[in-house]
Amino acid sequence: MAADPQTLFSVLVASTTVGTLLLLWCWWQNRAERVLMWSCAAYFSGSVAILLMTAPDILPEWITTSFAVAVTMWSIGLIWIAGRVFNRLPAKPWLALIGPAVWLIASELPQAYVAVPVRVSLATVITAAYALISAREFARADGLSSRYPVAVILGLHGIAVILRIPFAFALPIPHGLPLFSDWFSPVAIEGIVFSQIIGLLVVMLTRERLELQLRAIALTDPLTGLNNRRAIFERGHALLSHGSRHRRPVSVVALDLDHFKTINDRFGHPTGDAVLAAFADAIRQTLRAGDESGRIGGEEFVCVLPDTDADQAFAAAHRLVTHFTRLAADVPGCRTRCTASAGIATSSLDTDTFETLVSAADVALYEAKRGGGEKIIVASPRAISA
């Protein structure tokens, strides 16, 4: 037995209403995620449009047809706006009004010039265009795996909407409101499925990015923006394992700012923090893209250099500490010359763990500090003055 179209559209209203409430609650819990707010607005607009369509005996015909279809287009356009907001782009909600405006102008033309199937096709093309543009917006690559289901569902929705065009010409459409003709039942079914899925996927996408942000915060030193101790040890283990498998050397450079306590005592902790930030900048500006670095203590840092032998590591450390001295000279309020010392250890076939490598670099660093600082010593056991 065929499903009653009015019943299907009642279910569709219920689905969009539930989606509206779900997204509203999620946004209320985390109002920084404005993608949820715009998605909620899209669901709410969709609910309003469906309610308008289902009231032909109460409201004027132009509201239940032309205006209701325009609101439907607006709701899909708001999904695009939600995607823009998620991608940190300006919302520009007026973009979602272009399609509805075109439709309202066209719907005012006499039917002698624009037949009903042509009107339906125009509405279909505009709605599908918004869905496909939304899919493209959500498909931007940034490492979030939940993006792709959202983009796929929006893309499939756009294709499903386009497939209505042949039916608009092949099947009879009654004058006025065509929604409750039998051929329109599949439209309602597809809308129910779409509304049930897309809201949940948007919530999942938002949650995935929030979890990644929290993980990044947990693994990042807040002052310097470098890895913290936990993160540098995780990545160090991975780089050492990769180097061992491919029989390539991995060097660890342990670094410490010379006389840093004196800088804090003489010029204050804000100046000391600025010096630490300058050292982090020196690391970022001198190391390679594949190198890892982190702050493991107050003024202690570790750099992991894959595919790097002891001589190459020494050259890299020398560039780093020299560049740091130049950068620190521009730190406001710091009226002393800032230097750093380094200890280097390079992996070999009998290197046990990353901790062993770090310990060897620490011993070399301690020797450099004991000699007065501003030195780089390779755990070999030869010492080289910086």
Image: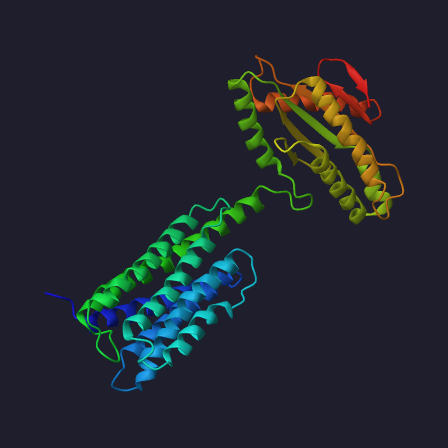
Q: Would residue 32 be found to the left or right of residue 385 on screen?
A: left
Give the x, y percent position of residue 196.
Answer: 31, 60
- Quadrant in the picture for residue 124: bottom left
Of residues 53 and 253, which is closer to you in this image? 53
Q: Position of residue 267 (x, y in %)?
A: 85, 46
Give the position of the N terminus as an image quadrant.
bottom left
Q: Residue at x 58, y 46 (%)?
A: 217
Q: Quadrant of residue 127?
A: bottom left
146 vs 304: above or below: below
**Above or below: residue 93 compared with residue 302:** below
For the residue pair 307 and 172, the one nearer the viewer reads as 172
Locate residue 14 relative to residue 372 in the image: left or right.
left
- Placement of the C terminus among the 4 image quadrants: top right
Q: Percent x, y for residue 345?
A: 67, 20
Q: Residue at x 32, y 60 (%)?
A: 162
The reply, left or right, for residue 292 in relation to residue 298 is left
In the rendered image, residue 38, in percent from the top left (x then y), is placed at 47, 66
In the picture as drawn, the residue positioned furthest to the front comes out as 113
Residue at the spot x=34%, y=78% of the render? 113
**Which of the pair 333/13 is nearer the observer?**
13
Q: How many marks?
A: 0
Viewer can see residue 30: no
Compared with residue 159, is residue 267 higher up or lower down, i.e. above or below?
above
Q: Quadrant of residue 306?
A: top right
